[in-house]
Amino acid sequence: MAINVDYYLNRIRSTVTSVAAQVSNALPGNPVTRDYEVLSQVGSAGPAYSWKIYAAQKRSTKKPVSVWLFEKRNLEKWPRYERELFSEILKKGISQLTRLRHPRILVIEHPLEESRDSYAFCTEPVFASLANALGHLDNITPHPKHLEEFEFLDIEIRHGLFQIVEALSFLHIDVRMMHRNVSPESVVINEKGEWKLAGFDFAVQGTQGINNQV
């Protein structure tokens, strides 16, 4: 069955709600918190900014990471079929991201974990999504100081776009995959300032065409 991407993005936008600055009540029950200490929220990303991104560190080594959280309560008013379908879309996206290895694709440090209230996984340290850096601070409360009046240099934009082109080239040529949702919400900036491709929720495997093109 074909997935209407715009329909689900608009639907989740209408139901995602802001919460207090502290870590959500949904996160402590998630298995991710056994290995990682979660700190403050630094950003949001994904379809309609549905993933909250938190600064965190591994308990055993103090290694900096980012924890991503999706709260199931955002879907509680949806019909059951649509809740299940959107949840599968999110899980599929993280599963595909976990399997991919490339310098221009976001690095997964801990795979997706599910609890009664949430989905969570862990990545390399993240500064924010590209959308956040451009001033779109949906699903972030309070707004992080590092994003207030943030502006890119022209050279940073050019270099960032080149990095995403490298990621897409890898997908199309080596993996034969179509991302189908390249947007500021699916591009993440790590703590080194590198732009990384994420958001594989709507990606599909392509077929080989003429001259090995997808």
Image: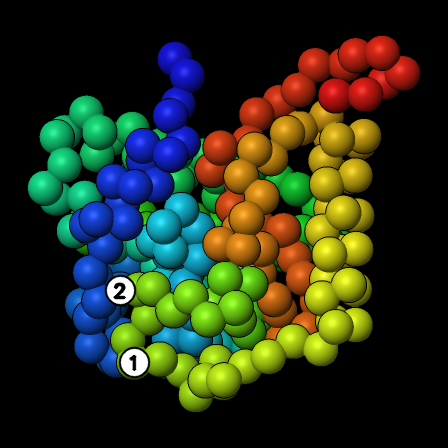
Q: Amino acid at mark 1?
A: Pro
Residue in view at x 77 percent, y 63 percent: 158
Indicate the position of residue 134 as horizontal and vertical percent values: 52, 68
Q: Vertical placement of 167 versus 56: above or below?
A: above
Picture quadrant where residue 92 is located: top left
Q: Nearer the viewer, residue 190 or 29?
A: 190
Asked if residue 187 lies left or right of residue 53, the reply is right
Q: Which residue is denoted by mark 2 in the rendering? A: 27
The residue shown at (72%, 35%) is 171
Contact (CB < 8 A) between labels 1 and 2? no
The one of 148 and 100 positioned closer to us in this rendering: 148
**Occupied quadrant, residue 10:** top left
Quarter of the image where the N terminus is located: top left
Crowding near pointer 2: few (<14 within 10 Å), some, many (20+)? Answer: many
**Residue 184 in sight from this viewpoint:** yes
Q: Position of residue 18 (x, y in %)?
A: 22, 67
- At a point 38% along the width and 25% down the height, the residue shown is 4
> In this view of the protein, can residue 36 be seen by the observer?
no
Q: Which residue is mark 1?
A: 142
- Circle 1 SS class: loop
| Vertical arrangement, residue 92 with respect to residue 138, above or below | above
Residue 208 against residue 78 in the figure, above or below = above
Left or right: 69 in relation to 157: left
3D distance between C-alphas at marks 1 and 2: 17 Å
Q: Nearer the viewer, mark 1 or mark 2?
A: 1
The part of the image, by quadrant, that contains residue 96 is top right
- Count of labels shown? 2
Say which of 139 and 176 sits in front.
139
Q: Residue at x 46, y 71 (%)?
A: 135
Circle nearer the N terminus (1, 2): 2
